[in-house]
Amino acid sequence: MAKHHPSGMDRTFSALADPTRRGVLLRLMDEPGLSVSELARPLSLKLPGMMKHLDVLSDAGLITRSKTGRTVSVNLSVGPMREAMAWLQRYERFWTVSLDRLVAFVEEDDEQ
Amino acid sequence: MAKHHPSGMDRTFSALADPTRRGVLLRLMDEPGLSVSELARPLSLKLPGMMKHLDVLSDAGLITRSKTGRTVSVNLSVGPMREAMAWLQRYERFWTVSLDRLVAFVEEDDEQ
């Protein structure tokens, strides 16, 4: 496959291609500012494993980390996800239009 | 990182994490049924390289391939993308609600 420098959207989709990372993002919606160990606990993940996942999310710009004393709190960041959503919405519009055309075609056919 | 068997959504996002593959999907929206070589041509990709990308898209269920004589035509398939879009929409709703709250908070603050 062609080698390339990963773009923002490459990193977004790549970060989302893992259930642990998607779970972290969903959890941060309900509980913003959780610490790394609070995020790791219910997943029975060791801290280094969780840190690696957070590095991927952070490199993709999907989370921010801030340190207060010895605690790192994690928060969501929206920017890059918007680009990925816009991409998928283009795809969605295509399918909506295609399905509308199909329905129109079937209905037209019914009338004959 | 934790090992896991990739789920449908893992494969969808993973397939989307590459600009060539996203380009192929967008192109198939405008020109459904293109052959493998027609897809490869404007990208100056060799056929084996294009086939690898198509394998990834096909494993993710995002395209279907059908052979007529010696020509393989490629078409989009919508199913798995819907799951990925539903996931991102949950994320989008979160941000819309958060921004609404922020606006309400700022406006409330203005009134004091």
Image (spheres, coloured by chain):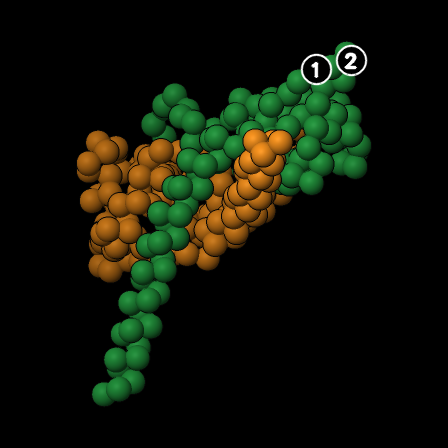
Chain colours: A orange, B green
Q: Chain of mark 1?
A: B
Q: Residues within 10 Å of mark 2 (few under 14, many from 20)?
A: few
**Quick check: can you spot residue B96?**
yes
Q: Position of residue A15 (x, y in %)?
A: 44, 40
**In what element is the residue under mark 2?**
loop
Q: Position of residue B2 (x, y in %)?
A: 34, 27
Q: Which amino acid, mark 1?
A: Lys
Q: Find disc 2 in the rendering and name its residue.
A: B70
Q: Position of residue B107 (x, y in %)?
A: 30, 79
Q: Which amino acid, mark 2?
A: Arg
Instruction: Work out whether A32 lies above or below A55.
Output: below
- The foreground one among A26 and A36 is A26
Q: Which mark is residue A2?
A: none
Q: Which mark is residue B67?
A: 1
- The foreground one among B69 and A104 is A104
Task: Let me know if marks 2 and 1 both belong to one chain.
Answer: yes
Q: CA distance from mark 2 to mark 1?
A: 7 Å
